[in-house]
Every structure is written in structure tokens, then in C-alpha cells.
Image: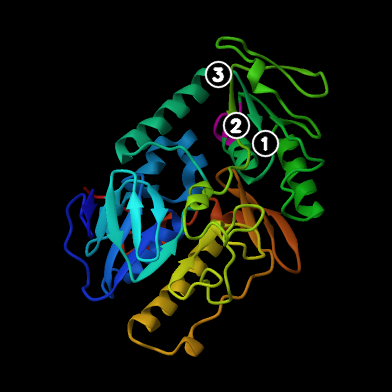
Amino acid sequence: MERGNQQEEGGEWGGGGKKVVVIGGGVAGSLIAKSLQFSSDLTLIDPKEYFEIPWASLRSMVEPSFAERSVIRHRDYLTNGHLITSTAIRITETEVLTADGRLVGYDYLVIATGHADRVPRTRTERLEQYEADNEKIKAANSILIIGGGPTGVELAGEIAVDYSEKKVTLVHNGSRLLEFLGPKASNKTLAWLKSRKVEVKLDQSVNLNNISEGNNTYVTSAGETINADCHFLCIGKPVASKWLKETILRDSMDEFGRLRVDENLRVKGRSNIFAIGDITDVKEIKQGYLAQKHALVATKNIKLLLKGGKEAKMAKYEPRSIKAIVSLGRHDAVAQFPMTTIIGLVPGLLKSKDLFVGKTRKSMGLDPHNNVY
């Protein structure tokens, strides 16, 4: 078992002084790691070697080259910290144990593990996965999408626009699409999909356990038969907190497996452990841009504490009212703001062309347009 902050690959040693450990290299964890690398002796622990801009993943399935900018090696932005490509399996009051046997000491700890999502370890493998998904789409005449949340809706939109000749069917077990938004957004989205010849079946599910390889016939819970050359499962993933049940934070989770945090984004009852992103019990919808806001607030607070500042001066995170933009292909989107819901080219101009990839890359200190290796 190795003890201490060990680098796995390249890069300079951290900023010195107090040790900060970030567990999870998603949209929140990567941003806070980037932001604290020159203020502390920082270690990022993540099971993959890259950070991926999550809201760009569906465009990458229809245009694999898009992933060249949205799948970013941690080492591209983490130039002054330690990177351990492994999984955290245990936390004590002072250390984190990883699956590959490393003990990493900390003064401040950030939990940012988000949702459980099985993805490849290397960037190259991830890019190859997008190529394979794209070949799967191109080879199919008919495609079944299971799930009518933002992932399923955006994938249906991408395919309907880029491959308009394909027969696309979307099955959702809810009474309306995009249930985290209001009924007006749901209705507008349904009308848009139908106008692009996407067949939508609501209040139904598909049991994939009965599907054998090469069998292109799917049966819904209502007994309807769907013929499709391939399918994509786009349902919600569980919070990645199961491992915490064996740690000192086992009593800090709510009934959904989320960590209870205070207004400063510290785990309740803990003075030096923060949680950010989807792993928290903050009462708001779980969206990437809000996870980034968590990271910025926690960064301020950790920097304050690193300098010996008073806890009373820590920044407070205030949950936001529902604001969301769901892309519908390359040009359109549906947007819900506090006072209105709109669909079409105007919200599409805000998100759909570049999907905020350039803006996100810039926030990570990278060239917005090019991915140069």
C-alpha cells in the first residue's frame, strides 16, 4: 500500500501547503481541481484519464469528431496537481484509500462523484466508443430510444435532424416528456419531435431482458410491438455514492444516496469535507451548469479556509429557479426560463450550435476551438 500523494502521470507537483483531495473528475470536480491547483497541494482522483463535457455527448454520437473538443485529458488543464487514475473506496478522517492501494492524505476533501456511469478509462477508448455508436446509427434503418428525459429527447433530435431518413421511435414511461420541466415545455417538445417524424409512445416501458442478440422486435408494457435495428437506453443513472456507505460519511446521506450539505456546500457536520454537483441534496434540478456553480462557491470557501479566513465569511450557495435549455438537433432547442417557455431557433442560438463546448473549454483555461496534442 502506497502512502502519500503519488502522481500517476506527468505534470508538476502541487501548489504546496495544505492538501486538497478532489474525488471525481466530472463537470464539477474538474473545475474545482483546476481552480485550486495553484493554491494547494492538490490531488484529483478519477477512474478515467479525461473530463468529458456531458451535454456534448449526444452530438458526438452523430458527429464523432465533435468529441475531439469535448473529451479533454485531465492533464490538459491540471498542470500543477497530482492525478490518480483510480477509484476511491474508503475515506477516513485524514485519508482516502483508492482501489489501487494508495493512501492519500488530505486537509480538505471534495466529493464530486456525480452519477454512476460506466465509461472507458482512456480518452482514446472513449473516442472509439463514439465512432462505434455512430456506425451503429448509420447502419440502422430504424432506431428505438428508451427514455424521454433530456438525454433521450436530445438524442432523438440529433438523429432526426442528421439522419432524417431513419425511422426513430421514442418510448417513455412517464405521461409526458422532460418531466423535470413544465407541461408547456413538454408539449412543445412533443410537437417538435412529431414534426420530425419521430414516433413517441408515452406511459410505456420496454423490458430489455427479453431481447436476444439479433432480435429486432421489442414489446412495450402496453403490448405494442416495435421493430428496430438497434436501441439506445437513455434512462437516469443512480447517484455514485454506494461506496460511501463503508466510509465515515455513511450517516451523511439522505434516502436517495445524496450527501447532505449546508449552505457553504460542506457535508453537514464536517468542517473540512465539501460535496458538489449531483451527489448533493441541494434542492434543485441536477444540471451541469449548476454543478459548475457549486464548484465555484466551494472553490471560494476552500481558498478562504486555506488562507486562515473566518468561516463566517464563507460564500453561501443559493439554489436556483428552474432554467433549462434542451437541444433539438443542430439549430433548435426548447428553453424554460422562470417567466416563459420558448422553442425554436432563438433558444437554439444559445446552445445548439456549439453546445457551450467552447465556453466550457475556455473556463478550463483551454483553447475554445482547438484540441491540440
Q: Amino acid at mark 2?
A: Leu
Q: Residues within 10 Å of mark 3 (few under 14, many from 20)?
A: some
Residue that numbered label 1 is attached to: 147
- The residue drawn where x is 58% and y is 29% is 232
**Position of 361 compared to 116: left or right?**
left
Q: Looking at the image, do the residues carrying marks 2 and 1 touch, with CB atoms under 8 Å apart?
A: yes
| Alpha carbon distance from label 3 to label 2 | 16 Å
Which residue sits at x=44%, y=36%?
Answer: 63
Q: Is residue 162 above or below residue 215?
A: below
* Circle on res. 9: none
Q: Residue at x 48, y 50 (%)?
A: 246
* Secondary structure of residue under mark 3: loop
As drawn, 360 above or below 174? below
| In the depicted structure, whether residue 161 falls above or below residue 33 | above
Residue 289 colored in magenta in the image: no
Residue 161 within the magenta-colored segment of the rendering: yes
Q: CA distance from mark 1 to mark 3?
A: 19 Å
**What amino acid is labelled 1 in the image?**
Gly
Q: Circle 3 is placed at which residue position?
A: 140
* Place of residue 147 in the rendered image (x, y in percent of width and height, measured from the top left): 67, 36
Residue bearing the label numbered 2: 233
Left or right of 163: which side holds 354?
Answer: left
Disc 2 residue crowd, few under 14, some 14–19, many 20+, Cα 10 Å: few
Q: Is residue 35 visible?
A: yes
* Of marks 1 and 3, the one in the foreground: 1
